[in-house]
Image: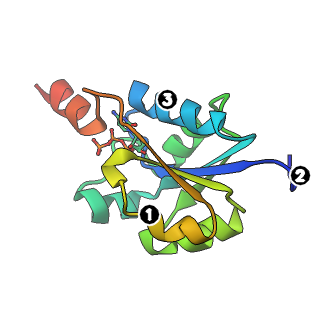
Amino acid sequence: MENQALTRVLTFGTFDVFHLGHLRILERAAALGDYLVVGVSSDELNRSKKGRFPIFSQDERLQLVGALRCVDQVFIEESLEQKRDYLVEYRADVLVMGDDWRGRFDEFGDICKVVYFQRTPAVSTTALIEKIRL
Ligand code: CTP
């Protein structure tokens, strides 16, 4: 699967308390190319970005996302500042992000195509955690 002719798609996320919104964006991302790589945010990155540690550890989230049929490769995203390095390292032709990030990654348009997908309505990890708490 390391063939240069393949269209390689890269996306990022925490994917904690895995839900349908996560599955949909990964399936849509995979449909844009031949090989889908997913950067799963580290526990520490999640803490600094969202102010809390995820429910599932980075290793558990990595295993869950990596087991999906639409996902070919996973790695731990350690830092938001390394996006460009990850895009180069994994030879991304396309970067996919949810539209909660619209415009924030346009700067990478010089090395790959940048696509924003609309989020699946009415579901999020944060809302699920709240619902379970109640
Ligand atoms: N995503 C989506 N639709 C949703 C929720 C998430 O398309 N309803 C996408 C995000 O845009 C992102 C990826 O799934 O590209 C991973 O999102 P993540 O932040 O892990 O999930 P959220 O449910 O948004 O988590 P939180 O509530 O903690 O922000």
* Depicted 103 relative to depicted 5: above or below: below
Q: Which mark is residue 23?
A: 3
Q: CA distance from mark 1 to mark 2?
A: 26 Å
At which x and y percent is residue 68? 62, 30
* Depicted 27 relative to depicted 36: above or below: above
Say if mark 2 contacts mark 3, CB within 8 Å: no
Say if mark 3 contacts mark 1, CB within 8 Å: no
Q: Which mark is residue 3?
A: 2
At which x and y percent is residue 73? 69, 47
Q: CA distance from mark 3 to mark 1?
A: 22 Å
Q: Amino acid at mark 1?
A: Phe
Residue drawn at the location 86% of the way across and 56% of the way down: 4
The secondary structure type at the circle numbered 2 is: loop
* Residue 81, picture quadrant: bottom left
The secondary structure type at the circle numbered 1 is: loop
Is 79 on the left-hand or right-hand side of 71? left
Is 98 on the left-hand or right-hand side of 37? left
Residue drawn at the location 42% of the way across and 48% of the way down: 14
Q: CA distance from mark 2 to mark 3?
A: 26 Å
Sequence-wise first label, 3 or 1: 3
